[in-house]
Image (tube, rainbow, N blue to C red):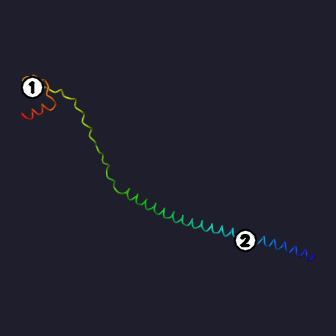
């Protein structure tokens, strides 16, 4: 091989080595990124496991409270009765009072004006 060919081969080898080193650096960077993501996911899983354990403990506590409540004697339910409203009474026909008859007899008038009969009755009693 000639020195020029040797130099050319060396240049090609240098270029290939440089490209391979760049590719290795990219792969290492990608591996580091994936490792970081994996660590983040492991932290999330650990937090979720902690949360799940706490939730299970809380559920067990609530279950115990429920069993305790169920074991206590329960009071009898009270039934409230509401009386039916009174039935309206049909209006009673009013009998002419003795005052109306006196009004008619002495003054020739038939009915009292509203409130007059009660007033006269109160005065007389």
Q: Residues within 10 Å of mark 2 (few under 14, many from 20)?
A: few
Q: Secondary structure at mark 1?
A: helix
* Front residue of 40 and 73: 40
Residue picked out by circle 1 = 103
In the rendered image, the quadrant that contains the N terminus is bottom right
**Residue 49 in the figure: left or right of residue 77:** right
Q: Position of residue 64 (x, y in %)?
A: 42, 60
Q: Which image quadrant is residue 42 in? A: bottom right
Residue found 14% across the figure and 25% down from its top: 111
**Residue 85 in the figure: left or right of residue 63:** left
Residue found 8% across the figure and 24% down from its top: 107
Q: Which mark is residue 25?
A: 2
Q: Position of residue 92 (x, y in %)?
A: 19, 28
In the rendered image, the quadrant that contains the C terminus is top left
Q: Which image quadrant is residue 88 in? A: top left
- Cα separation, mark 1 vs mark 2, equals 126 Å
Q: Which image quadrant is residue 10 in? A: bottom right
* Front residue of 52 and 61: 52
Residue found 67% across the figure and 70% down from its top: 32
How many callouts does the rendering have? 2
């Amino acid at each position: 091989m000639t020195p020029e060919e040797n130099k050319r081969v060396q240049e090609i080898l240098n270029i290939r080595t440089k490209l391979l080193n760049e590719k290795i650096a990219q792969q290492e960077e990608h591996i580091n990124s994936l490792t970081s993501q994996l660590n983040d996911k492991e932290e999330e899983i650990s937090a979720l496991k902690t949360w799940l354990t706490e939730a299970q403990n809380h559920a067990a506590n609530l279950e115990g409270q429920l069993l305790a409540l169920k074991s206590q004697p329960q009071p009898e339910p009270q039934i409230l009765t509401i009386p039916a409203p009174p039935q309206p009474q049909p209006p009673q026909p009013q009998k002419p009072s003795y005052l109306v008859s006196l009004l008619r007899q002495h003054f020739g008038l038939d009915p009292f004006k509203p409130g007059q009969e009660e007033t006269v009755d109160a005065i007389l009693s």
